[in-house]
Every structure is written in C-alpha cells, then in structure tokens.
Amino acid sequence: MTKQTKISFIKPAAPKSGVAVAFAAEGLGLGAMTAEFLKNMTGGLERAAAVAKFTGKKSSTLDLIAPAGLAVDRLIVVGLGKPEELGEQDWLKLGGTVMGALDSAKAADATVLAEIAGEGDLSAEALAAFAMGAKLRAYKFDTYKTKKADDDSGPSSLKLQIAVPDPRPVKKAWAAADGIADGVYLARDLVNEPPNALGPVEFADKAAALKKLGVEIEILGEKEMKKLKMAALLGVSQGATRPPRLVIMRWNGGKKNDAPLAFVGKGVVFDTGGISIKPAAGMEEMKGDMGGAAAVTGLMHALAARKAKANVVGVIGLVENMPDGNAQRPGDIVKAMSGTTIEILNTDAEGRLVLADAMWYTQDRFKPAFMIDLATLTGAVIVALGNHNAGLYSNNDDLADKLKSAAGETGEAVWRMPLSPDYDKLIDTPNADVKNTGGRWAGSITAAQFLQRFANDKPWAHLDIAGTAFGSPKNEINQGWASGYGVRLLDRLVSSFYEK
Ligand code: BES
Ligand code: MN
Ligand code: ZN
C-alpha cells in the first residue's frame, strides 16, 4: 500500500510526460526563467502567474494543467523567494512542499528542473536537502490499511527525477542523505507501529535487522540483565507479560582505538503508568514511549547506510510498563546496577529507571567519548517547550554547544535547560539514595537530575523528546504522527564534529 518514491538525479532534458516542476525567484518575472523548455510557453506562463497573483514568494506554487506548448501534463512552478537567502532548512522545506504538490496532483512521474534564472548552479548540499525534504514528506504509515480511501485514486509509485547540469557531486551527497532519510523512516515506523505488534522482542528483532548494513548486534534478555543487577530496568518490566530486552548496536567506522560515541534510548513500548496508572484519555499515545529507542535505532541505520567514519554504540532499553499482580508498587526500593538505591514513589516515572541501568551499563562497558540519551521522559517538558524544541540537559558545555549547532543546521531544535544542586535536592529521600519523582514543579528538570546520577560524571547530554517525537503539528516534511526526531540531529552531530 505504501507509495514507493524513487528519487534520482539526471542531466537536464526536456521532460516529455508527467509533471514538470520549475523554480521561480521572487519578483524576477517568469519570462526570465532559464529552464530551456519553458521558453515555449513563456507568454502563457506570465498570464497564468498574473491571474493567480503568483510572484515567486517562498513556498508558493503555481499549478498549470495541460500547459499549451509543452509535452508534459502539468507544470508546477515553485516560488523560492530570494534564492541567495535560502539555507539548508529552506531547501529541505521546499522539497517537502514540492512533494506535497506532487501528491495532490497524483503524479506518477515528475521532473524537477533544478535551476534558477540568473544564478549559478545550485550546490550539492542544497539539492540533497531538497531531495531529502521530498522523501521525508512522502512518508506514509499505512501498513494496516487494507483498503484505499475513496479519495485516494493516486498511483502506487512516484518516479521523481531532479535535473541538474552536473549530477555527479549531488549524487554523492544524495547517497548519504538518502540513507539518513531511511533512518528517519525507520524511526517513524517504529514509533507509529501499534503496541500489540511491537513489543520489546519485536523491536529487538527490527534492530537486529541492521546487521545487513554491517551493524553489530547484541541482545540481552532478562537472565543476562539479572546477572548484571539491572534491578531498576527490570522493576519496570516486572508487571508485564512480554519480556524485556536490552539491545546493543555497534557501528565501527572509525579508527580502531577511538573511544566510541554512545547513544542511549528509552524504549518503553507501552506506558500504562503501571500501578500509578494513567487516565484513559490519550493513553494510546503511549505506544510512542519508545521514541528515544527509535531515534537511536534510526540513527544507527543512518550512520551505517552512509558508512560514517566514526565508532558509535547505540544502547536501547526495551520494556513494557504494565500493572498486574506482580507489578512494581509505589514505595518499593530497588538497587540499580550502579549500586544506587531508588525509592519508587510513582510507577509512571519509569523511563528514568530504564535509563538508569542502560546509561550506567553503557558508560561502564564502553568508556565512550560522550553519552547522549534520548527519552520521551516527561509531560513537563511539553508544558515548558511544546512541540518545537526538545529539552537539552548536559553536564558538559562543549557537548551542549555542539548539539545546539547541529540543531540549528537540521531544524531539529533543542533548548538548553538548567541542572543544579538545588534541583537535585528535590529527589532526595530519607528512605533510599534517591527517589524517582521530584514532585509537581520542574518535572523535566528533576527527571534530568535523576539521570545525571547515572552518568558517572562522564560527558553526558540528555534530550527530553516527549514533545518532539510524536504528535507535532503537520509541516512541510512530516504529515504523520511520528516525526523521527533526533535522527537527523544526531547524524549531523556525528558528521560535523566527529568524522575527520
Ligand atoms: N512517558 C511519560 C512521559 C510522556 C508524557 C511522554 C506525554 C510523551 C507524552 C513518562 O513515563 C511519564 O509518565 N512521566 C510522568 C512523570 C511523573 C509521574 C513524575 C509525567 O510526565 O507525568
Ligand atoms: Mn510513565
Ligand atoms: Zn514513559
């Protein structure tokens, strides 16, 4: 059912069928467009633009059906605004906008004439970003639809060719971007999957499929985790029938002795809250409570697909948080792998318990250069930042700055939040070393303070992605529920700062 989209780069040739897409800079006058084959219909184009009041404003489109003088069935002119002002994110969004227009046009075959009047050739980076935006927009999760919707008479595939004078450099840039986009697809699929289909075992199987890209996989079950004394993670899982998994993914693309970069993901395949059960309304969203683990898995896919020159380890803790006769209780005290004792005050604050053991294990075993965890950790971060920024916490300014830089480039935004001993006091308890909730105020911060105790003072950053992993408003590059947030951000962190 999923529409197949095949994107390729070709040398310019007048398209003879399907949909042609051309770019127009703002205020240039459409007659000045260089795309050679459009000259045949210049007059008609100017009149159409005048009638539609199309001036080339960024992301506006002019849609001409059966354009006189051209062999194509349709011509879509896309406004660029001022081309010299276009950055990577603009190109990404423009690609998304074009894919949206092609989708509405039910196109099966389209050619983008990627040139701008009066400008030099577009950079390979700009074109790869454009193509990635198109691919991200084309994503649909319709695995479980057995019938097409009545209004969906579109084709089952789209061949999108992007015509540029010299396709060679952009083909290389696109090969990498295409792999990154596949990583985003994988992360979105994992988050969108219904929870009955994706338990810890099924998730681990999907991660194991990365073997075919050269990722080394290890999967730990309950027995192995018991041996490692991961009582914090196992306590969350103990009310569930489906057994937990810890998956370790390794990509060794760097120098043999370079310390790896580590990414750790919260993978609660479904979060009922446990005995501190959540209200019914909206609980279905908690199928996405493995968004951190999905981002780490998607990232490993991206890095392996583009053969990143770095050593990277991804660790995901996969559990289900269920209430039953054997479930963990408020008041229970567990001893984490680190030796820290934790008093459980609310079984719905389970993500930090999973991460406590996954993080400790990761730093202890791999001695990474840094460790970044991703988690749909708190409702409080959504109150603070909404859907537009992940909460960033770090014990290391350099790492935080690098993340901010990668966020600025990719548009996967982060906003740094504070850590301090004052907040740390909020999770002290007379009964154990730490308690798993800090009360009503500063909920996202006290969760981060909790995690910090399991980073063992190593360079560490935490991304609370509860507001960004799913449920964001539709935009140019995502029309679905899961966003795949984090894959592009962390791939860029690696490529900009750790591959030389
Ligand atoms: N998975 C939730 C956080 C969440 C909420 C993610 C909404 C995405 C959307 C987490 O396990 C949770 O339940 N957190 C509690 C913590 C509280 C009990 C201290 C919360 O945020 O209410
Ligand atoms: Mn919870
Ligand atoms: Zn949760």
Image (cartoon, helix red, strand yellow):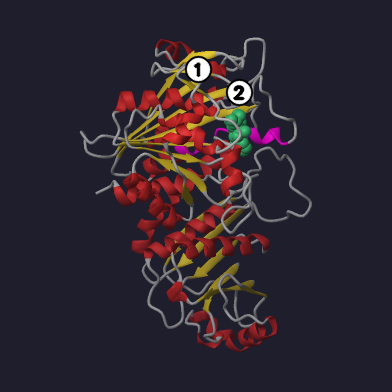
Residue 361 among those drawn in magenta: no
Q: Is residue 129 left or right of residue 386?
A: left
Q: Quadrant of the N terminus?
A: top right
Does dot 2 land on a helix, a strand or a loop? loop
Q: Where is residue 142 drawn, in percent x and y?
A: 66, 43
Q: Nearer the viewer, residue 408 or 318?
A: 408
Q: Position of residue 40 (x, y in %)?
A: 56, 85
Let me know if residue 295 is in the magenta part: yes
Residue with the mark numbered 2: 346
Query: Quick one: which residue is furthest to the bottom in this view?
Result: 43
Q: Report the magenta residues as a range.
A: 282-296
Please identify, in this view, whether the residue under mark 1 or under mark 2 is nearer the observer. 1
**Kind of element beneath mark 1:** loop
Q: Earlier in the sequence, mark 1 or mark 2?
A: 2
Residue plotted at (54% across, 87% down):
31
Q: Residue at x 57, y 55 (%)?
A: 137
Identity, as a three-letter code, of the amino acid under mark 2: Asn
- Is disc 1 surrounded by few (<14), some (14 to 19) or many (20+) residues within 10 Å? few
Give percent across and percent down for residue 474.
63, 54
User: Would you identify the image quadrant in which residue 460 lies?
Assistant: top left
- Which residue is identified by label 1? 430
The residue that appears at 62% across and 46% down in the rendered structure is: 2
- The answer to whether one can see residue 16 in this image is no
Mark 2, ligand 1, within 8 Å: the answer is yes
Task: Kindly tell me whether residue 472 is visible in this rendering.
Answer: yes
